[in-house]
Image: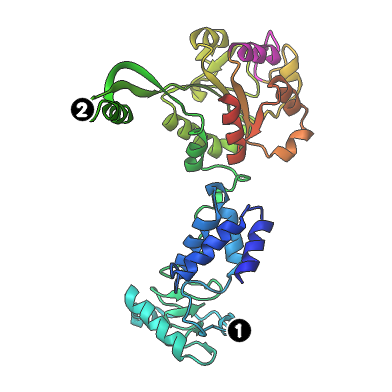
Amino acid sequence: MLVEFFFLLRGAGLKVSITEFLALLEGLQRGLAQYSIDEFYYLARTCLVKDESLYDRFDQVFAAHFKGIEHVFGPAGAEIPQDWLRQQFDRLFSDEEKARIQALDWDELMETLRRRLQEQKERHAGGSKWIGTGGTSPFGSGGYNPAGVRIGPAGGQRSAVKVWDQRVYRNLDDSLELGTRNLKVALRRLRRFARQGAADELDLCGTIDSTARNAGWLDLRMRPERHNAIKVLLLLDAGGSMDDHVRVCEELFSAARGEFKHLQYFYFHNCVYEGLWKDNRRRHTQKTPTMEVLHTYAADYKLIFVGDATMSPYEITYPGGSVEHFNAEPGARWMQRLLDTYPKAIWLNPEPENRWAYSSSVRILSELMDQRMFPLTVSGLEQGMKALS
């Protein structure tokens, strides 16, 4: 079973090595996961998965391979036949029946389940004691018990105390859209620190080294405090087709504000022209000239565009191409001015990458960005952070 699991993980793209697999087997031999599928799950994930972005892929393989084994491994020889756990009926309970069902505490629940595994000799359904389906027993599936352990396929009440198969990391696969947490993880790869100001922070490593070199006489060493030195200029496309991507852009904005002390942001629509704005509600009355932005923020800022780059090609290449006003100069010229001022620049596109080839405007902007356009996924954001470093 475990050898097959190893090859399934390899087939799913997890680069599990023989050494890691042997470490898992050694952990099992040492009794690190005896009777709990939870313990085995965490032991296997710790030994076999090296990157948290692959947790979801691991969870899917684990769920498929160990389907039907939900919480507890029984003692040797106590296996539950799969056909015992087949869903037979979806029993409905009255409020009075539910009120009579008493929930066991956790230790009592586990001890009772171990006894049931040893004593039960046949399949059971609809009862209140044995492992089965559709009843009020704390063990099985498809019935009702407010503090039970689900064994078998998902039931209708969804009230089990513990079900390991939650896939809590399902949004961490590097091919999926991002949540605020993993946006922060990816953005953190760009964060660098610099020593600035007066030497008012204890340099512990320097103190230890200097004291050792000084024959044990204490020699305190100080250093300037560490400050986040990254400066980010974030330009966000708003409105139109970007309405479909509001959630992920809000998460990106929230994550960026939490990660970067020096963050400046502005909005634009479709393509950058002579004006940007801070407030979408006053976009037509309170604009900041793009030339003012170029003269205000120095070239050491990292420039990040966020937009789907989906528009008429005329909006990029021709004067007057904007859908909202008459632009005296084409968007491409303003894009080039920004890229000349900020050589460290990327474009993050929330549209799936497999659609880019079908949009001429995406191809034009990607060429203007010198192919530094990346999908707004964990993998894409990591590539973007490398390009900005």
Q: Amino acid at mark 2?
A: Trp
**Residue on which the image places disc 2:** 217
Residue 69 highlighted magenta (yes or no): no
Q: Amino acid at mark 1?
A: Asp
In the rendered view, would you say 45 is above or below 38?
Answer: above
Q: x, y percentage for residue 99?
A: 34, 79
Are the residues at dot 2 and dot 1 in contact (C-beta closer than 8 Å)?
no
**Residue on which the image places disc 1:** 83
Range shown magenta: 324-341
Residue at screen point 52% across, 12% down: 288
Provide the secondary structure element on which disc 1 rests: helix
Of the pair 279 and 40, the residue shown nearer to us:
40
Provide the secondary structure element on which disc 2 rests: loop
Q: Mark 2 to mark 1: distance in Å?
A: 74 Å
* Quadrant in the picture for residue 12: bottom right
Of the pair 299 and 85, the residue shown nearer to us:
299
In the rendered view, would you say 171 is above or below 250?
Answer: below
**For the stretch drawn in magenta, what is the main secondary structure?**
helix
Could you classify mark 2 by the number of other residues whose Cα lies within 10 Å: few (under 14), some (14-19), or many (20 or more)?
A: few
Left or right: residue 236 compared with residue 110: right
Q: x, y percentage for residue 352?
A: 68, 40
Residue at screen point 54% across, 71% down: 154
Residue 243 in view in this figure: no
Residue at screen point 58% across, 35% down: 382
* Quadrant in the picture for residue 204: top left
Of the pair 321 and 131, the residue shown nearer to us:
131
Residue 246 in view in this figure: yes
